Amino acid sequence: MPVPGGLPQAEARPDGLALAAQALRVPPLAPDVDRSVALDAGTRAGQPAAAALPGAEPRHRLDLPENRRVVLFCASDVNAPRKGLELLARALRSLDEAPLLLLAGNGDPPAGVESRSLGAVSDDAVLAQVYAAADVLAVPAVADALTQTAIESIACGTPCVSFDRGGVTDVVRHLETGYQARFGDVGDLARGLLALLDDADGFGPRCRRAAEDEFSVDLQVRRYVELYEQVLAEA
């Protein structure tokens, strides 16, 4: 079986295991921040994605209220326990003025939370509008290594709230591109939501800059090339 990331089997050569182990220190290939989300030059200049997308405002296109704060949750199966939707729902229910929960993916909304479900979203342009329409992306996963949605979200200038464990912490940098709540702490997750909702626009430029500086495909490919060159030079 190939090693994740397209690396050869460790058994293929004596130093294969070392190669695979070293590769784990390199972030996995990220979505192209200029291709996988349809951003225009305004966003690349550091403006919030919602203001930069051409044409009608994303919320208008998605028929979302303009005067509500919106928390986005994305997953192919929103009810998968490892994705943490129930933890997010508990955090939302604890807020005095709960924002609207926007779900992108298959599955049922949580009870006791006002929500809107978009179903599965596969079109890149629509996905960009979804990220841009949200004030915050919630990534309360309890078992994921690295979630692509967090990278796509910050590429659109939308900050993320997550737990302080797992690969997502490489993307959600505390008070820079989002908020890292203590693992499994619903109260801290709620505090993180409030912190980001109160200053979502302020996080936008930092999020976009981090996406460009750390998670572009060109950068990730260059890092893999450098890794292979280093390993081959030492072989």
Image (cartoon, rainbow, N blue to C red):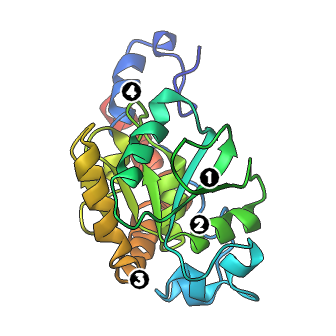
Q: Would you identify the image quadrant in which residue 164 lies?
A: top left
Q: Is residue 74 above or below residue 64?
A: above
Q: CA distance from mark 4 to mark 2?
A: 36 Å
Label 3 neighbourhood size at 10 Å, few (<14), some (14-19), many (20+)? some
Q: Return the mark for residue 103.
A: 1
Q: CA distance from mark 4 to mark 3?
A: 42 Å
Q: CA distance from mark 1 to mark 4?
A: 39 Å
* 53 lies left or right of 135: right
Label 1 neighbourhood size at 10 Å, few (<14), some (14-19), many (20+)? many
At label 1, the amino acid type is: Leu
Label 2 neighbourhood size at 10 Å, few (<14), some (14-19), many (20+)? many
Task: Of the two numbered discs 1 and 2 on the same chain, state the one appearing first in sequence.
Answer: 1
Secondary element under disc 2, as helix, strand or loop, is helix
Task: Of the two numbered discs 4 and 2 on the same chain, state the one appearing first in sequence.
Answer: 4
Q: Which residue is the site of mark 2? A: 131
Label 4 neighbourhood size at 10 Å, few (<14), some (14-19), many (20+)? many
Labels 1, 2: front one: 1
At label 4, the amino acid type is: Leu
Q: Report the label total.
A: 4
Task: Of the two numbered discs 4 and 3 on the same chain, state the one appearing first in sequence.
Answer: 4
Q: Which residue is the site of mark 4? A: 19
* Disc 1 to disc 2: CB gap under 8 Å: no
